[in-house]
Image: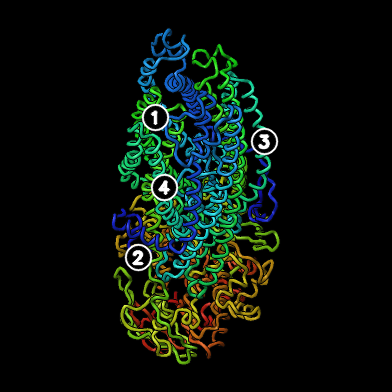
């Protein structure tokens, strides 16, 4: 995003992984009460899930197969004993009613009745598109419950609320840091990228935290209960117990094996998503260029290509995931098959009842499902790490105000001084070389020079948009770096060459320069800027809403609006970069005259090409190749027959 | 339903009651509208359905066989069916015609069971994976077609539409909403078809076991329908709101980034942030409501379905306990399910669970479809828009530039209220440079927009080569015109790519030649990678004047007979400007060149000057002549330089 290389697409090393996870956990730590509640709710759910296969066993054994109630070759775990006691002496019909009743309660409470097949989970996920960009939508709303029914509903709502709160805080932070970046950070490509980071990368953090904290703990709990039950009830079939111990590790190993591949595909998929977003974004903003160049077909084709690529990468990612699931399913089946023989033998020999097999399938099903989910955590981790990293990249950038001190200056009474300043771009290209410039209150200084000579860069120094590599910029003798940013913004107003207009009313657009400005002040600034007439002509005058980027205004009108914005702020220092390039001479003269009237209270720095504007300045500085080569009033400079300024004027008039 | 592009589209007013019901008529409409995107993939869809059905039937049948083998034979020791003996080569005397299986007999079975299960499972897993991947490919392809069409549509709209819509919204639409279309095709047509198939299949099979079970399974539809109906409208409203708020948030971020310099320069970050906070919270609140409701619906669906399962399970258990005969015992004889036993119980339960699961899926899909319907609306809003400027049915391509460009009595206004241009008459023949001057907002750029046919005048005629441009195909007209815009918009590709943007097939030499005319060649060569320097990050390092020259080069390379330059020299110093103009004059020898400008130095280069004031022609002719004869024009020029014309040599 900045002049520094964008490292967001690089591979994530293990050290970095741990670092990122650590930081994310740090973010979520304040939410530990919520996490605890979620764990408790999950535990309750798990407990009930593990209880429910037993009524079905009894149904099968005592009703379907017709075994007597008292007999059971397999020991019944203590947490089931009370239930069995109830069943003593019941007729099959009564048992059926009993089981049905329990199942009903099960359904209402947790949406399950124990056969493990039709159990539902609470899931509010919306259908999503088939590539990474659209899938991120659901991530921001991550919530789930292992169970359904009342408990499931409660758990779902609770978690969703928590996820929202967390994600809200996080994206607020990211947006804040984005806005806090120094001005020089922003380039044309930033916009789509910014949207992506705030909206679609931030959920990665909550997802990871959930995956790392909640999922493993719940899974471990469940695995523990299953193993314990196996030990207690089914020790007659040792291979079962062994399987219970081995299942988890085996599934996990198969997950790890596929991680490298998954990571690469995920990265590629995410990148492609950003690319397509950028292409659309560009095409939309540049609609005038696209249409007038007759290039919409080309734009469309480009989009087509990008979109295809994005889909294809997603497919490739899905394929890896599918393979992984296939692999795990195979491992799982392998394990079950192995055990099957022992189970069959035990039942044939009478050491287990047919109903027990139901329990086993249910329990092992849960075991495998959860282990696969655990493996998926690792898998998804790769996916989400990239998102996390992109988020932290923004948060870690140095903010504007961090490069500044905390002093304040009430107002500028004397003037500004640029003191032997040199400036080079972050990549080393020199732009300004030992520039010195002074301007007092009441003065208007014009900067002239060829394009690319450094005028704009020079002007950026005054509001400290950029900071000198050597030398200082002083307001009333105080280094601008020492001043607090807010204060500096109050003292220096800058009107940009390419005006930006926001989706708001005309009045509010102007008011950006001074949010507390009254309607009269806004109108008066508009008048001085020569904007009053055309504003009055708009359908709702000052309250007319401007569309995206104010497309209904011409460039000249936008420029006048931007000038009004600068004027309404009443700052003692006003810098205008080519304020009149798009204005006709009459409007410009009117503006310059009006500015003259304001002079006593301000320092005016104006970058201009127009002779009529420049002539009226108290001092003119000619900038060439990053240096000030001439300085003086119009009359003074004209006296020098070889001077750059004189050449410039003559060209203008005799052309 | 075409709009003129001036109305605020319905989706921009979130509090307006939503009228998009998802009834049969609408479903049909959706189908018809999406058909063009589905059509190319029909073959694949059919193949997919058929394969899925085959896999399903195969799985179901094999499942029965294995259930019979395992549950009856191994677990309960009950006799098997003739199918088993047939397939596995077992002796019916030992396995079928007995009361119960001996322990030895039972011990033979696990191997057989495994021998059949493993391949079955393998086949199911592999075909499952393949079919899944296939389905993704199919739907991605459909989505792709739609996305591209959306982009196309958006771009073809005239500028008026874009001034009202928000870009963030546009992007959101292309992505989320077009994704919804494919999901909806899946959810309204494909998935219900498959689930319904399974449900009915289940009904049939279960009926074979007992009509009562089938009855219970059948009436489950009633509460399911009621549930679906009850939730559909509230869900739709909730989803729509969620999407719109999300879109607003995205737009806000976007706008903040685009205008970041102004925001920072005016110290407005706090304002932006508090608005962001509000929008973010709103978005989450709406998302919560929508999803919580969806979850609730899912849970209730399961309750409905769960009751059915309990009922059938209980009934089956009692049948099994009584060892009653199954209904279609002759059919089920082969599987060993002639009477109710553990195998029959399991088989029937499996079918019930599957059917009921399908029903439940149908309900939840219906719930999600409400969300999709909202997305669909927004997509169709765009697809339904007809571009304002369309070719006349008998339009033909532009042949020659002939006598040049002419405006005759042209009047135009954007909003049909205030005319921007009134009664414009001008003519420019090839080899002429016409400067168009006048106060800002007087309609200079608009004049050129009319030439480009970005809009049509209300009265009057614009002709090229004597032909009314309305009779010319838009595509050919625009091929003949190149424009360098006032706003120096560059793309984030290399300089080379930027310059040959409209003419991608142009060679490097052509690019350099164009850059030379625009006096950009020198500074480009000084860039770090010359013509291959990417502009994404560095465009901010180019000065405005440099950007402007690249934009001019971009227009020049089109080599078109008509060239429009909108304020091409605004950011150039006089020296550079002179050089550019010199080059242009040479270049423009057989072309019509229009220059919109303020600068005297530029004006003097032109053959003719068109002076516009308040949207009318106040003067037209050569500069020197107008200076003498036309007072209005003279005072205009004087204002430009602040110097009285009379003192000039």
Q: Disc 2 designates what residue? A: A3
Mark whose residue sits in front, 1 or 2: 1
Residue with the mark numbered 4:
A221
Mark 2 neighbour class, 10 Å CA radius: few under 14, some 14 to 19, many 20 or more? some
Q: Foreground mark, 4 or 3?
A: 4
Disc 1 to disc 3, C-alpha distance: 37 Å
Q: Residues within 10 Å of mark 1 (few under 14, many from 20)?
A: some
Tell me the SS state at disc 2.
Answer: loop
**Residue A625, position as x, y percentages in the image:** 33, 76
Of residues A549 and B394, the one nearer the viewer is: A549
The answer to whether residue A549 is visible is yes
Q: Are marks 4 and 2 on the same chain?
A: yes
Query: Horizontal placement of A15 versus B303: left or right?
Result: left
Residue at image position (33%, 59%) is A7
Say which label, 1 or 3, has the lower sequence index: 1
Q: Mark 4 to mark 2: distance in Å?
A: 49 Å
Q: Which residue is mark 3?
A: B223
Marks 1 and 2 on same chain: no
For residue B641, above or below residue B165 = below
* Mark 2 to mark 3 CA distance (whole Å): 62 Å
> CA separation, marks 4 and 3?
37 Å
Which numbered circle lies on residue B126? Answer: 1
Of B309 and B602, nearer the camera is: B309
Answer whether labels 1 and 4 touch (C-beta < 8 Å): no
Q: Quadrant of residue A588?
A: bottom right
Q: Could you tell me if the residues under marks 2 and 3 are in contact, i.e. CB atoms within 8 Å? A: no
């Amino acid at each position: 995003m900045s002049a520094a290389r964008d490292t967001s697409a690089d591979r994530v090393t293990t050290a970095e992984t741990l670092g990122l996870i650590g930081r994310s956990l740090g973010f979520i730590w304040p939410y530990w009460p919520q996490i605890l509640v979620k764990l408790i709710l999950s535990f309750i759910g798990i407990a009930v899930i593990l209880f429910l296969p037993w009524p079905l066993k009894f149904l099968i054994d005592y009703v379907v197969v017709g075994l007597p109630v008292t007999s059971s070759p397999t020991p019944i775990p203590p947490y089931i004993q009370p239930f069995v006691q109830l069943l003593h002496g019941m007729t099959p019909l009564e048992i059926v009613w009993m089981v049905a009743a329990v199942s009903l309660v099960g359904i209402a409470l947790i949406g399950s009745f124990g056969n493990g097949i039709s159990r539902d989970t609470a899931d509010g996920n919306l259908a999503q598109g088939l590539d990474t960009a659209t899938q991120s939508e659901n991530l921001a709303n991550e919530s789930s419950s292992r169970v359904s029914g009342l408990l499931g509903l409660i758990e779902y709502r609770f978690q969703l609320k928590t996820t929202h709160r967390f994600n809200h805080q996080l994206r607020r932070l990211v947006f804040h840091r984005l806005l806090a970046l120094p001005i020089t950070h922003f380039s044309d490509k930033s916009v789509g990228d910014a949207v992506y980071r705030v909206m679609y990368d931030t959920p990665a953090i909550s997802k990871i935290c959930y995956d790392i904290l909640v999922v493993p703990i719940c899974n471990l709990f469940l695995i523990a209960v299953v193993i314990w039950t196996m030990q207690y009830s089914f020790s007659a079939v040792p291979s079962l117990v062994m399987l219970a111990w081995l299942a988890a590790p085996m599934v996990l190993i198969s997950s790890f094996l596929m991680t490298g591949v998954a990571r690469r595909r995920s990265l590629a998929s995410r990148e492609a998503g950003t690319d397509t977003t950028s292409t659309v974004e560009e095409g939309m903003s540049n609609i005038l260029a696209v249409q007038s160049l007759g290039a919409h077909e080309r734009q469309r084709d480009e989009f087509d290509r990008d979109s295809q690529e994005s889909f294809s990468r997603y497919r490739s990612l899905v394929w890896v995931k599918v393979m992984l699931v296939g692999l795990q399913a195979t491992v799982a089946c392998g394990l079950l098959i192995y055990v099957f023989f022992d189970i069959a033998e035990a039942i044939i020999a009478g050491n287990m009842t047919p109903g027990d097999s139901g329990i086993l399938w249910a329990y092992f099903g849960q075991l495998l499902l959860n282990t696969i989910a655990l493996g998926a955590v690792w898998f998804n981790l790769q996916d989400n790490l990239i998102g996390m990293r992109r988020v932290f990249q923004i948060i870690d950038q140095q903010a504007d105000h961090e490069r500044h001190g905390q002093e304040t200056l009430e107002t500028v009474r004397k003037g500004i001084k640029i003191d032997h300043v040199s400036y080079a771009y972050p990549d080393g290209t020199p732009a300004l070389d030992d520039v010195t410039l002074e301007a007092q209150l009441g003065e208007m200084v014009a900067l002239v020079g060829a394009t690319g000579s450094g005028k704009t860069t020079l002007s950026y120094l005054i509001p400290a948009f950029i900071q000198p590599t050597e030398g200082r910029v002083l307001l009333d003798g105080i280094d601008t770096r020492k001043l607090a940013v807010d204060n500096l913004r109050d003292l220096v107003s800058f009107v940009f060459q390419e005006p930006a207009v926001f989706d708001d009313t005309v009045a509010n657009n102007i008011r950006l320069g001074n949010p507390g400005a009254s309607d009269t002040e806004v109108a008066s600034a508009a008048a001085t800027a020569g904007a009053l007439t055309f504003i009055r002509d708009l359908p709702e005058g000052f309250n007319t809403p401007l569309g995206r980027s104010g497309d209904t205004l011409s460039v000249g009108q936008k420029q006048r609006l931007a000038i009004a914005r600068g004027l309404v702020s009443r700052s003692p220092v006003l810098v205008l970069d080519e304020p009149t390039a798009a204005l006709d001479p009459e409007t410009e003269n009117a503006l310059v005259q009006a500015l003259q009237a304001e002079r006593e209270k301000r320092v005016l720095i104006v970058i201009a090409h127009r002779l009529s504007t420049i002539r009226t300045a108290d001092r003119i500085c000619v900038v060439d190749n990053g240096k000030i080569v001439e300085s003086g009033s119009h009359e003074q400079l004209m006296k020098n027959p070889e001077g750059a300024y004189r050449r410039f004027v003559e060209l203008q008039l005799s052309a | 339903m075409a709009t003129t592009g001036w109305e605020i589209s319905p989706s921009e007013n979130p509090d307006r009651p939503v009228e998009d019901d998802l009834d049969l008529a609408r479903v049909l409409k959706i189908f018809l509208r999406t058909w063009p995107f589905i059509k190319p993939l029909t073959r694949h869809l059919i193949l997919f359905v058929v394969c899925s059905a085959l896999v399903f039937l195969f799985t179901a049948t094999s499942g029965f066989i294995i259930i019979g083998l395992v549950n009856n034979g191994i677990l309960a020791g009950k006799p098997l069916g003739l199918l088993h003996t047939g397939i596995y080569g077992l002796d019916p005397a030992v396995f079928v015609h007995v009361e119960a299986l001996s322990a030895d007999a039972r011990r033979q079975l696990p191997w057989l069971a495994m021998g059949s299960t493993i391949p079955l499972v393998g086949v199911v897993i592999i075909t499952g994976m393949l079919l899944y991947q296939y389905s993704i490919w199919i739907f991605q392809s459909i989505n792709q077609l739609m996305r591209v069409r959306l982009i196309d549509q958006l771009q073809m709209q005239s500028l008026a539409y874009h001034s009202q819509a928000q870009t963030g919204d546009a992007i959101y639409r292309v992505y989320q909403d077009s994704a919804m279309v494919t999901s909806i095709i899946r959810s309204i047509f494909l998935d219900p078809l498959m689930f319904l198939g399974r449900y009915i299949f289940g009904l049939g099979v279960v009926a074979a076991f007992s009509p009562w079970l089938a009855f219970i399974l059948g009436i489950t539809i009633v509460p399911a329908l009621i549930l679906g109906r009850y939730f559909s409208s509230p869900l739709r409203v909730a989803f729509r709101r969620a999407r719109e708020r999300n879109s607003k948030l995205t737009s806000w971020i976007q706008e903040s980034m685009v205008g970041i310099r102004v925001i920072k320069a005016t110290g407005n970050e706090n304002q932006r942030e508090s608005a962001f906070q509000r929008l973010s919270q709103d978005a989450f609140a709406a998302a919560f409501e929508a999803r919580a409701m969806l979850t609730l619906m899912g849970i209730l669906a399961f309750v409905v379905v769960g009751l059915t399962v309990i009922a059938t399970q209980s009934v089956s258990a009692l049948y099994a306990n009584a060892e009653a005969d199954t209904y279609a015992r002759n059919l089920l004889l082969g599987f060993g399910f002639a009477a109710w036993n553990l195998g029959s119980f399991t088989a029937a339960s499996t079918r019930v669970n599957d059917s009921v699961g399908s029903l439940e899926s149908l309900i939840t899909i219906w719930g999600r479809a409400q969300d999709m319907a909202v997305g669909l609306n927004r997509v169709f809003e765009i697809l339904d828009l007809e571009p304002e400027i369309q070719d006349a049915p008998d339009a033909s391509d532009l042949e020659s530039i002939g006598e040049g460009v002419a405006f005759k009595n042209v009047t135009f206004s954007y909003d049909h209220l205030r005319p921007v241009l009134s009664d414009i008459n001008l003519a420019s023949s090839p080899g002429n440079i016409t400067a168009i001057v006048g106060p800002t907002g007087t309609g200079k750029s608009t004049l050129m927009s009319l030439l480009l046919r970005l809009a049509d005048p209300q009265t009057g005629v614009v002709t090229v080569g004597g032909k009314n441009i309305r009779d010319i195909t838009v595509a050919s007209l625009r091929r003949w015109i190149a424009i360098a815009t006032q706003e120096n918009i560059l793309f984030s590709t290399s300089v080379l790519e930027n310059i040959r943007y409209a003419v991608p097939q142009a060679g490097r030499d052509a690019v350099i030649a164009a850059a030379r005319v625009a006096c950009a060649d020198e500074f480009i060569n000084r860039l770090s990678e010359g013509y291959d320097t990417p502009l994404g990050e560095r465009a901010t390092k180019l000065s405005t004047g440099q950007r402007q020259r690249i934009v001019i080069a971009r227009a020049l390379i089109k080599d078109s007979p008509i060239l429009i330059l909108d304020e091409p020299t605004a950011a150039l110093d006089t020296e550079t400007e002179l050089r550019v103009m010199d080059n242009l004059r040479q270049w423009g020898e057989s072309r019509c060149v229009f220059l919109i400008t303020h600068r005297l130095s530029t004006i003097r280069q032109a053959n003719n000057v068109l002076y516009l004031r308040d949207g009318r022609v106040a003067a037209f002719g050569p500069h020197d002549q107008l200076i003498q004869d036309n007072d209005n024009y003279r005072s205009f020029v004087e204002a430009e330089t602040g110097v009285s014309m009379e003192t000039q040599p």
